Amino acid sequence: MEELVYTSICQNNGLIIFDALGEGEMQTGRRLYEDLLDHSAAIGRAGYCSFHKIKSKQMLIAALRLVHAECRSGVLSPVLHFECHGDPAKGIFLHASKEYVGWEELVQEIAAINQATRNNTAVVLAVCHGFEVSRFVSIMAPCPFNYLIAAPDEVRAGYLRDVIPGFYKSVVQSGDLQAGLALLAPPLTLFHCGEWFYRTLATFMVNSFNAAGRAEVVEQIVTNQVAKAGYSNREMIRAARAKAKAYVRSPHGFYNHASSIFFHGKLPIPYGDFRAFVEGKRHCR
């Protein structure tokens, strides 16, 4: 099968730790911050790491929106690191206030930050079930983060304490994500949005780029446009549907539209390369 070569660049210049653990628990977030503070200063990257002790949902949202404001000004492209407990259905748990922040709501806040950085925001969830946030990535919407590192199930605090500092030290010093990933092991798993997008879109093109599939995509595009506008009327919906039908009229047009939306205006891989990848998958069915 034809291979698809894809090189991703995520230009991070700061690590922000959000710690919502209880005072009586293993302080993995605080220890990570202190460890990386010394390391980044030693290699000439003082100020790389910052720390927020989160005591309520309101405080977390405010901290994330402060990060968003910095990103919009063009000075920050962060790795967002979360230290807390997680529930597969309820989201992340904030110990001090006994509140949950749902996975979808968390992704919405992160997505705004990623949009401001033009897909240069990474997420590390040192949280049980943190991989749940990957469910909210869609080929029909801008990717909410460049990549995610998280666990699909439970993860021990001792494991996080032992491996996470080494991962960050490697990435900060070398700038090479793959070198850092080599120091991690299950249950922590990488979810790379770009890689996921091309695999998912190729599968859709092989199995579902037919009349029914295209009609479904048209309605999804219209729904997204209405949500983005914040209102709807008959004329707006008619115009949005006409544009959406034009996008899905050909595989090339659909690919360009979906890629541009997902990658925040960028087109990392030419259509010809993607088409060869799709044809390879089609012949392997």
Image (cartoon, rainbow, N blue to C red):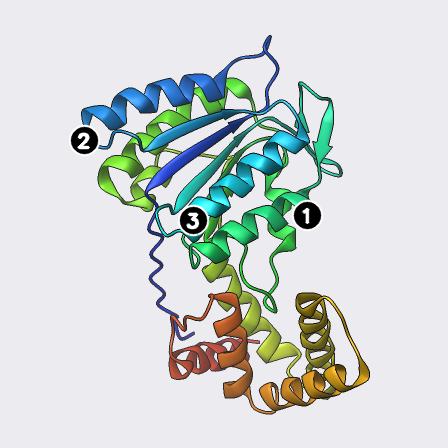
Q: CA distance from mark 1 to mark 2?
A: 37 Å
Mark toward the start of the polypeptide (3 vs 1): 3
* Residue type highlighted by circle 3: Cys
Q: CA distance from mark 2 to mark 3?
A: 22 Å
Please provide percent x and percent y for residue 29.
48, 22
In this image, 37 relative to 174: left or right? right
- Name the residue rendered at 43%, 49% in the picture: 71
**Residue occupied by mark 3:** 71
Frontmost of labels 2 and 3 is: 3
* Residue type highlighted by circle 2: Gly
In this image, 60 relative to 213: left or right? left
Q: CA distance from mark 3 to mark 1?
A: 21 Å
**Residue occupied by mark 1:** 104
Is 268 or 56 nearer to us in this picture? 56
* Residue type highlighted by circle 1: Glu
Position of the N terminus by quadrant:
bottom left
Furthest residue toward top = 24
Q: Is residue 40 above or below residue 148?
A: above
Q: Secondary structure at mark 3?
A: helix
Q: Splitting the image into 4 quarters, where does residue 181 fall?
A: top left
Callout 3 environment at 10 Å: few (<14), some (14 to 19), or many (20+)?
many
Mark toward the start of the polypeptide (1 vs 2): 2
